[in-house]
Amino acid sequence: MITLWKFIKKKYRITSRYLTVFHIILLLFTPLYAHFPYIIITAEKEVSLLANLAPDATISNLAIMLLIGGFIILPGLFHLMRSFNMIKVLEKPQKD
């Protein structure tokens, strides 16, 4: 948290944004870590994350399809964002 304030003070915008996202992810996963493997806790019972796992074949097929989809979709998304000048981090600054 202190490092985030230092980056904001020095006006490192990109780094402070990534650090903020990292802090938010940590805040969202803290309850999951504290109550693992129970994701839903009620007065009567607890629903475990590990109680009803999918078969290994399903999980491996899902992983393969996510990788293939990522390799197909992400380059097109990068090109789309680049063509609309939404990505300016990789460009060299122009000298006037």
Image: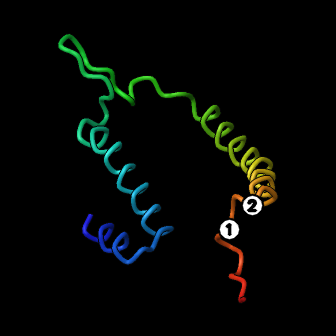
* Residue on which the image places disc 1: 88
Picture coordinates of residue 82, whole percent (x, y)? 77, 60
Amino acid identity at mark 2 = Asn
Which residue is depicted at the point 74% across and 55% down?
A: 81
- Disc 2 secondary structure class: loop
Q: CA distance from mark 1 to mark 2?
A: 7 Å
In the picture provided, is 25 more to the left or to the right than 83?
A: left
Against 63, is 39 above or below? Answer: above
* Residue on which the image places disc 2: 85
Q: For the residues labelled 1 and 2, say whether their Cβ atoms are less than 8 Å apart.
A: yes
Against 11, is 59 above or below? Answer: above
Res. 51 image quadrant: top left
Picture coordinates of residue 86, whole percent (x, y)? 70, 58
Q: Total label count? A: 2
- In this view, which residue lies farthest toward the front? 96
- Crowding around mark 2 (Cα neighbors within 10 Å: few <14, some 14 to 19, many 20+) is few
Q: Which mark is residue 61?
A: none
- In the image, 37 versus 81, the foreground residue is 81
Picture coordinates of residue 96, whole percent (x, y)? 72, 89
Which residue is depicted at the point 23% across and 16% down?
A: 42
Against 32, is 47 above or below? Answer: above
Amino acid identity at mark 1 = Lys
Res. 37 image quadrant: top left
Which residue is depicted at the point 34% across and 26% down?
A: 48
Res. 46 image quadrant: top left
- In the image, 9 versus 33, the foreground residue is 9
Which residue is depicted at the point 20% across and 10% down?
A: 44
- In this view, which residue lies farthest toward the top? 44
- Disc 1 secondary structure class: loop
Picture coordinates of residue 24, whole percent (x, y)? 37, 49
In the picture provided, is 10 more to the left or to the right than 35?
A: right
